[in-house]
Image (cartoon, rainbow, N blue to C red):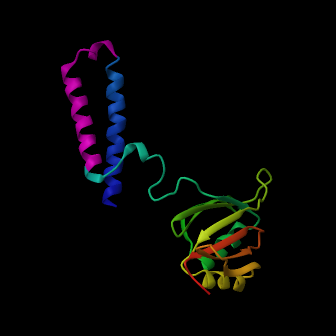
Amino acid sequence: MRQEFWLKLLYILTKLIGQIGLLFRHPLFRSSIVLTRLYIFIIFILTMFSAILKVDFMKAYKPEDYNSLSPYLIVDNAQQLVDLLTVIFDAKTLRRYDQKNGKIMHIELLLDDTVVMISDSTENYGANKTMLHIYVPDVFETYAKALEQGCMAIEPPANRGGDPDTRGSFYDFAGNHWSVSTQNIRE
């Protein structure tokens, strides 16, 4: 919470620097030593805060703790998929936006260290199917949970020679192919 406050303050200071930079274009302020010193002071403060908070403004282009690439699943009955992923993978909701009709416009789930985005299909965005691979702590337990929740088995977890992963796969109700793996588990 404290870091969020300082990040907002730094954002405001960054905007202030931009405004001061615009003032330098105005003829009255072009030679102002006071503005020059103020500008340098604010840049110094920003640099100090970013060093203290270990914030790299060049990397602040995405929400903190988000991965750069997120699968986006558009399905019929997104709430059913959210409920399924919550049971199977212990997914946590990060953000949610609903349509006026109660359907999910956009939801972001955290599955371990990965953000998965989901929405209900619409007239303009039809349902799609994809294949996803996820590492889990116990492939056998995860696979069993999926089948208990009504997912369709593709292949049970097994370790194939030369592969460091024990891997199984299933289809969810929407037709998405889930490959679940745990490294270095032997049957």
Residue 29 painted magenta:
yes
Tell me what residue is drawn at x 74 percent, y 79 percent: 155
Tell me what residue is drawn at x 50 percent, y 57 percent: 66
Q: Quadrant of residue 139?
A: bottom right
Residue 149: horizontal and vertical position, in percent?
70, 82
Tell me what residue is drawn at x 27 percent, y 41 percent: 47
The quadrant of the picture occupied by the C terminus is: bottom right
Q: Main secondary structure of the magenta part?
A: helix
Residue 3: horizontal and vertical position, in percent?
32, 56
In the depicted structure, whether residue 86 falls above or below residue 51? below
The quadrant of the picture occupied by the N terminus is: bottom left
Residue 73: horizontal and vertical position, in percent?
69, 60
* Residue 52 visible somewhere in the drawing: yes
Tell me what residue is drawn at x 33 percent, y 34 percent: 16
Q: Which residues are magenta?
A: 26-51
In the depicted structure, whether residue 142 falls above or below residue 115? below
